[in-house]
Image (cartoon, coloured by chain):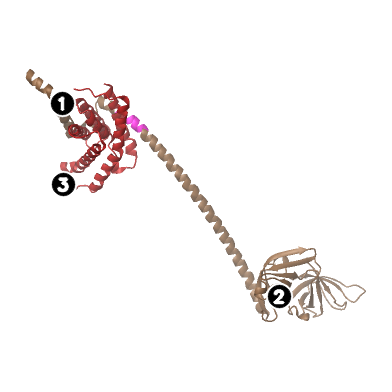
Amino acid sequence: MWKIWDFIKERRRLFGGIVLLAWAFSLFTAGETPRLSPGPLAKVLLALVSYPGRTITFTLQGLAGIGRNYFLLVGVEAENQKLKKNLLDLEAARFQCRETQSENTRLKTLLHYSLANTYTVIPAQVIGQSQNGGYLSLTLNQGQRAGLRPGLPVATSQGLVGRISEVGFQEAKVILLTDRNSAVPILMEKTRSQGIARGTGDGKLEIRYFSRLEDVGVGDLALTSGLEGIYPKGIRVGQIQDVRRKNYGLFQDIWAEPSVDFSRLEEVLVIFQEEPK
Amino acid sequence: MRAILLYLGWGWLFVVLQVSLFAFLPLGEARPDLLFFLILYLGVEFGTLGGAILVFFLGYVLDLVSSSFFGLNSLLALLFFFWVSWISHRVDSRDLPFWAVALAVFSVVEILFFWFWPWLLNPGAELPTGLFSALVLRTVGNLVFGLPIMKLLYLADNRRGKESVPQL
């Protein structure tokens, strides 16, 4: 008996290993049973591992959640900025579209006007307006390159605007009809009587040289007479606003309102009575 | 006794990390078997019956918290421990190449077992696909994480002055 015990003791590693392996193998072959009904030791071991494990997992999940939300918010912020920029671009495009539509309508009206007249015209855009005392002028975006030169009349579909006074390479200055230096030969549409419309510098026209005997009334239309060869005949100049007949003198005192609203000018036509060079 | 408590502490830490941190990381098949790094270390340094009991206990704990087949980790841990312990007397086992070979062998055996054991139980079942990628990934994962951890275990032992597991 003692011999057997000594034999085992001498080979305790071997026998211990065999016992452990057998135990492990029996656990393995026993299947799921021990897990379903863990004993007190297994419960303690499970608690020792699972509590800290759960803490680490929850912490990691929380950190990952914060990270995900942060990156999500960063994405939302970037998307928001992008959408705002898109909105601004669309607003700008919409505005541009509306402007183009409006310009198209105005140009169509101008074209119709130019066809009604038999003159060669060049459309130009108003790029500047200045008022210095009673001296009013516009700046156009066309100049020598388009064949413009001083003296050419400028009009819109509403009526006469003025004439070109100075020409640059790509711009031209226009003296308005209402400028103090402006004088336009006119005739009354109704009576065909002739006179001169001078600018007063305050947005009105003074009609001169109308005989006291002429029948001129408020509302009558004044057109260019075509004399002096500067302005083509028949362009509307203004509408009579005030007529004063004195008991003395040769002429009446007449004031007119220009046909063109100079404050809303955007496009005009430069009129050539011959082909532009 | 202090040594047993120390390695139980290491084992507890590795098991906790394996079922929490490394289960959380998206490593897939490359998820390392942390506890088996400690078993490799124990096999090299303390190939005794005391070491085997410790290894069996740690394998059992791992079985309790995570195992597809209960008892598998206890069995694999013991087999791995005895194999390392046996071979470490015949080659230079305190060096990186040995650890690398041992970890690679363990990875292959573990994956092959997980792949074929269900099929052995139920021969009519179809074998899952992706065996090769699983082998490669698990081996790489174990090598990438295992070698630094082995180094860390040796460094920790050198700092405190080694004390062996009680000889039975």
Q: Residue furthest front?
A: B92
How far apart in space, not on screen, are marks 1 and 3 (Cα)?
40 Å
The label on residue A23 is none
Q: Main secondary structure of the magenta part?
A: helix
Question: Chain under label 3?
Answer: B
* Same chain for the residues under marks 3 and 2 in the image: no
Chain (red) = B
Which region is colored magenta? A46-55
Can you tell which quarter of the image residue A214 is in? bottom right
Residue A13 is marked as 1
Task: Say which residue label 3 marks.
Answer: B124
Q: Which chain is brown?
A: A
Report, in whole angstroms, how far the alpha carbon at label 1 lies from the one at label 2: 119 Å
Coordinates of residue B57 in the picture (x, y in percent): 23, 28
Residue B164's quadrant in the figure? top left
Which secondary structure, mark 2? loop
Q: Is residue A48 visible?
A: no
Tell me which chain the residue with mark 1 is part of.
Answer: A
Mark sitting on residue A149: 2
- Viewer-nearest of labels 3 and 2? 2
Which quarter of the image is occupied by the C terminus of chain B? top left
* Classed neighbour count for the residue bearing mark 3: other residues with Cα under 10 Å, few (<14), some (14–19), many (≥20): few
Q: Residue furthest right?
A: A248
Whether labels 1 and 3 share one chain = no
In the rendering, at what x and y percent does residue A87 appear? 54, 55
Instruction: Identify the subunit bearing mark 2.
Output: A
Pointers 1 and 2 within a single chain: yes
